[in-house]
Image: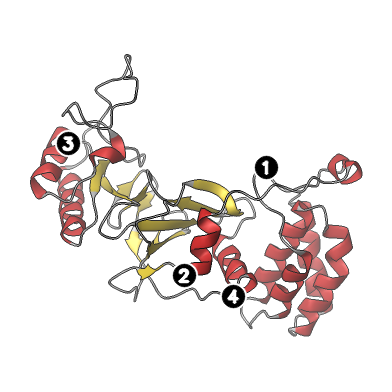
Amino acid sequence: MTPPPDAHTAALAEALAAAERGYPVIPLTRAKLPALRSPHRGHPEVPPCHGGCGRLGHGVHDASTDPFAIRRMFAAAPWATGYGIACGLPPHHLIGLDLDTKNGADGLTALLFLAEAHDFPVPPTITVRTPSGGRHVWFTGPPSPPVPNSVGRLAPGIDVRGAGGYLVGPGSLTAHGRYVLAPNAPARPAPVPGALLTLLTDPPTPTRRASPQRAGAGYGPPPGVPPQPAAALVRFVRSSPVGQRNARLFWAACRAYEDGLGPELAARLTEAACHTGLPEHEARATITSASRQH
């Protein structure tokens, strides 16, 4: 269905502005999918064609900073109301962290936990707010090694957009709303911290299996998500600043129950929360709420 002309025109203007800053772009539908269908549908190429045929419709492989190429793509997709920014390509070699806030996950808290556990700063950088209440955090990376795309591997609530992936650009209109730059965001993405880059490029950590008793009780981390060290979870709660105490406690308790350690860690997490000034009855209620999520 063709959108109002102003939505399409606005998306094109935003895409051209992003391209001027060195971000390769493609048009997107309201469903956040590449707007141009593959010319090889029904008879796929072997090996897959990544645009060598000269036609449009190769998804992120069509991404460009050339204004003529961008206008050509948008002209071929008048239904496009947004644009995607390809990750992993020069000059920025963009890395995107999609910090979600669904199903008990809290991507921002998970990122803060990783930063504290692995001793790296989270520098101010371009941040895009999503219609669902999450946020996309942008970093620049080195040309190699390539950062793979992943869903929840780094931590629950964090999806990674790397080589071969794309981020929905700010200003894009989707079926659920508009993506917008966060207030006071820097004009340029910050370089990815070295320790975070190591986490992003290291092979996946094997998941520790829960004991049969815990597995029977419904415990155990999601497939592909490494267990969180118990001591690090307690330290994370113990160092909570005012305003984050309940959120950090809930997040840590959720991770403990996912790892099958909820009953064992409940007392230590309660003590850590009380150390920050959180009332004991409130800490216990938060941990109980986390246990019901799992």
Name the quadrant of the N terminus: top left
Query: Where is residue 182 shown, x and y percent of the image?
Result: 37, 68
Query: Where is residue 42 shown, x and y percent of the image?
Result: 33, 14
In this rendering, position of residue 49 left or right of residue 220: left
Find the distance from the CA under tag 1 to the CA under tag 2.
Answer: 26 Å
Q: How crowded is mark 3: few (under 14 residues within 10 Å), some or many (20 or more)?
A: many
Q: Give the residue number, with chain letter if any, for mark 2.
A: 193
Q: Name the outermost residue toward the front.
A: 144
Q: How crowded is mark 1: few (under 14 residues within 10 Å), some or many (20 or more)?
A: few
Answer above or below: position of 84 versus 114. above
Q: Give the residue number, with chain letter if any, for mark 4.
A: 119
Please tell me whether mark 4 or mark 1 is closer to you in this view.
4
Find the distance from the CA under tag 3 to the CA under tag 4.
Answer: 47 Å
| The quadrant where residue 179 appears | bottom left
| The quadrant where residue 263 appears | bottom right
| The quadrant where residue 81 appears | top left
Contact check, label 4 and label 2, Cβ < 8 Å:
no
Task: Say which amino acid is labelled 3.
Answer: Pro
Task: Say which amino acid is labelled 1.
Answer: Pro
Q: Give the residue number, with chain letter if any, for mark 3.
A: 78
Q: What element carries label 4?
A: loop
Please tell me whether mark 3 or mark 1 is closer to you in this view.
1
Query: Where is residue 227 shown, x and y percent of the image?
Result: 72, 55
Find the distance from the CA under tag 4 to the CA under tag 2.
Answer: 10 Å
Please tell me whether mark 3 or mark 4 is closer to you in this view.
4
In this rendering, position of residue 31 left or right of residue 263: left
Q: Give the residue number, with chain letter if any, for mark 1.
A: 223
